[in-house]
Amino acid sequence: MSTDRIRPVTMPKWGIEMQEGTVTAWNVELGRHVDKGDALLDVETEKIVNSVESPASGTLRRILAPMHDTLPVGALIAVLSDPDVAEADIDAFVRDFKPFDASFAEGSPAAVATPSAPAAAAVEAATDGGGEGEARVSPIAKRLAEKLGIDLSRVTGTGRNGRISKEDVEAYAASLQQAGSSAAVASAAGAAQPTRREKLTSMRSTIARRLSESKRDIPHYRLVADLDMDALASRRARLVASGLRISINDLLLHAIATALRQHPRLNAQFAGEELLQYEQVDLAVAVATPGGLVTPIVRDAANQSVQQIAAAVRDLAERARAGKLAREEITGGTFTVSSLGMFGVRQFDAIINPPQVAILAIGAVQERPVVRNGALAVGQQATVSLSSDHRVVDGADAAGFLATLSEVVANVTGE
């Protein structure tokens, strides 16, 4: 049987950091014909859900990854064929499927084993598919896992490129022991409270990994400032009275973008030995979704009006919560803004979103006692906390940005 009559569908690779994907929906039933380019299935990876297009025309003969299955990049997830291909030939194709050696090509499958032994496949992919010549499982971690009888496919690596270390294996072993102890205590008590275990989605796993790496690898420091919001609040009231849908956050985003143009060292990305400073301000705005936090980007925010920013944020937030953002809409930001003011939070600290070098956390706008011209008064203020990467952003740079932002916000005019 010529194998060109049987065509594999593998877990695609979108972006250099993608390691696995979770099947969220099949859009074609088994046995149906598909044309090349048809939407075959949906896969969740990192912070978005992407549609996987059929790589060829043919009949969908096998689905090897049912809904909610998580497979590594390059794993065989389905088989297409000409309609008259025998079932035995499909079986042989699945059994003998060989990985593609294209782990560094974006949009191409990476090296994995055949799906006939999923646990072994995950371990093989983890140990053989390292980045920059670095194995994804350290030798000592592999030996320890074998000694403890731990399946490495269930261990989340916290090292570079997801590398699994001895500490990762020890942490996983400790979690198993703790879970066992908790179950034993509950059993002894005779009336255990309900326990719910929830497998992390690809999005949540990616968030966990990236935030752990950021907190561990980036020397954060924070500066706090109170912004005088009276002028900004007055402008919003005028805009709303004129029939426009404008929030305080929209006005703040406009002010932040304006201030960043004067401080390109914060409107930047840190790439190894280089600090890439940008003239265009691409603001990443944190949005809470059912699956986790995503940061869609308002492009060229400094050259947009407040009304344009407001419309863009509404559109991006709605599609983020619906899981309909495209990859290019969440990558390439130059600065991130996160706000919890709508929950009444006065102040909080945010973790930098690498490769960016700073993030601004915005608290609630509140009436507070202030001193003006030597007299006590009541004014509207908001506390902001700027987290910066001390490797490339000095304290004076961060302080200068906050001073400029304070001035911009306090002197807002116009309709």
Image: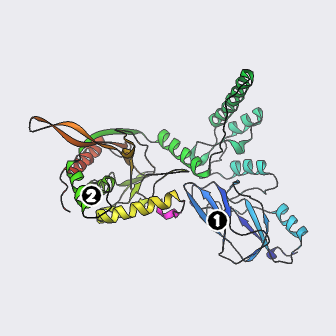
Looking at the picture, tell me which residue is in the foreground, 259 or 22.
Answer: 22
Q: Nearer the viewer, residue 107 or 244?
A: 244
The answer to whether residue 42 shows anywhere in this view is yes
For residue 393, what is the image quadrant?
top left
Name which residue lies at 21% across and 53% down. 234
The residue most toward the top is 188
Where are the magenta residues, as a range? 323-329
At label 1, the amino acid type is Ser
Residue ID at (74%, 41%):
151
Can you tell which of label 1 and label 2 is closer to the viewer? 2
Is 325 one of the magenta-colored residues?
yes
The disc placed on residue 147 is: none
**Residue 279 in the image, given as x and y percentages of width and height:** 32, 62
Disc 1: which residue? 108
Give the side of residue 333 with respect to residue 17, left or right.
left
Above or below residue 373? Residue 270 is below
Residue 352, given in percent of the width and then of the height, sits at 43, 46
**Quadrant placement of the N terminus:** bottom right
Residue 334 in the magenta stretch? The answer is no
Callout 1: 10 Å neighbours few (<14), some, many (20+)? some
Above or below residue 305? Residue 293 is above
Q: Quadrant of residue 181?
A: top right
Q: CA distance from mark 1 to mark 2?
A: 40 Å
Residue sitting nearer the eye, 17 or 304: 304
The disc at residue 258 is: 2
